[in-house]
Image (cartoon, rainbow, N blue to C red):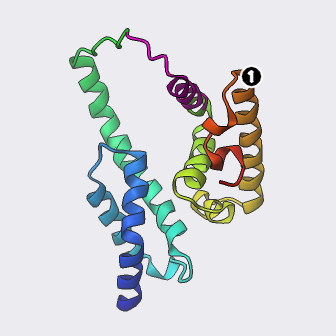
């Protein structure tokens, strides 16, 4: 067991750290990762031997959610105390930046569960089957959501004249 855990730790630690960092840059990534692997050690019989990474991502998601809930109260208080600097009035006329901002706004309007599906597929490079493990749902449900999300992004980008080359490949559904 110890040897298998050590092997899993060596193979997956960096991936778990990237997963956490991409979702919350203001947390101690190493601390969250250590909590993930502590959970894996405690529940080692539940960790799939062949593909532990999606299981670890699911644990990381829950650990991170707990961490972020605790920090959210502190952030709200800090935001009340600290004056927010006014936004920069200098417009950026770069079409690519404008398109990226528009795509980000569209992403931000998605439900959190849909955002997480896109993060798992586009950022983490998971398959729909692996994303389904992380999300705790069926592969078919994830595949259907991905298709629906791709249609939404296609319609959104087409209606705003955003070239398909500016839409990330994983979201657009085309091969790189």
Quarter of the image where the C terminus is located:
bottom right
Residue 38 pos. (x, y %): 33, 71
Which image quarter: residue 100? Answer: top right
Looking at the picture, does residue 174 appear above or below residue 129? above
Does 129 sit left or right of 84 as displayed?
A: right
Q: Residue at x 78, y 59 (%)?
A: 140
Q: Element at badge 1?
A: helix
Q: Residue at x 39, y 84 (%)?
A: 7
**Is residue 33 in the magenta section?**
no
Residue 136 pos. (x, y %): 62, 60
Can residue 41 be seen here? The reply is: no
Can residue 175 be seen here? The reply is: yes
Which residues lie in the magenta part?
90-106
Q: How many marks?
A: 1
The residue beneath circle 1 is: 159
Residue 99 pos. (x, y %): 57, 26
Quarter of the image where the N terminus is located:
bottom left
Looking at the picture, does residue 45 appear above or below residue 84? below
Q: Residue at x 56, y 26 (%)?
A: 105
């Amino acid at each position: 067991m110890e040897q298998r855990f050590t092997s899993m730790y060596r193979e997956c630690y960096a991936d778990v750290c990237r997963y956490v960092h991409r979702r919350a840059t203001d947390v101690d990534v190493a601390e969250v990762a250590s909590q993930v692997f502590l959970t894996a050690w405690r529940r080692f019989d539940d960790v799939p031997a062949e593909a532990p990474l999606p299981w670890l991502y699911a644990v990381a998601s829950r650990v991170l959610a707990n961490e972020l809930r605790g920090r959210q109260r502190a952030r709200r208080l800090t935001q009340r105390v600290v004056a927010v600097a006014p936004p920069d009035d200098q417009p950026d006329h770069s079409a690519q930046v404008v398109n990226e901002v528009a795509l980000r706004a569209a992403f931000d309007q998605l439900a959190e569960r849909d955002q997480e599906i896109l993060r798992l597929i586009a950022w983490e490079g998971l398959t729909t089957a692996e994303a389904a493990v992380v999300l705790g749902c069926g592969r078919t449900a994830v595949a259907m959501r991905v298709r629906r999300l791709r249609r939404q992004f296609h319609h959104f980008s087409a209606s705003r004249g955003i070239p398909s080359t500016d839409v990330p490949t994983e979201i657009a559904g085309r091969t790189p």
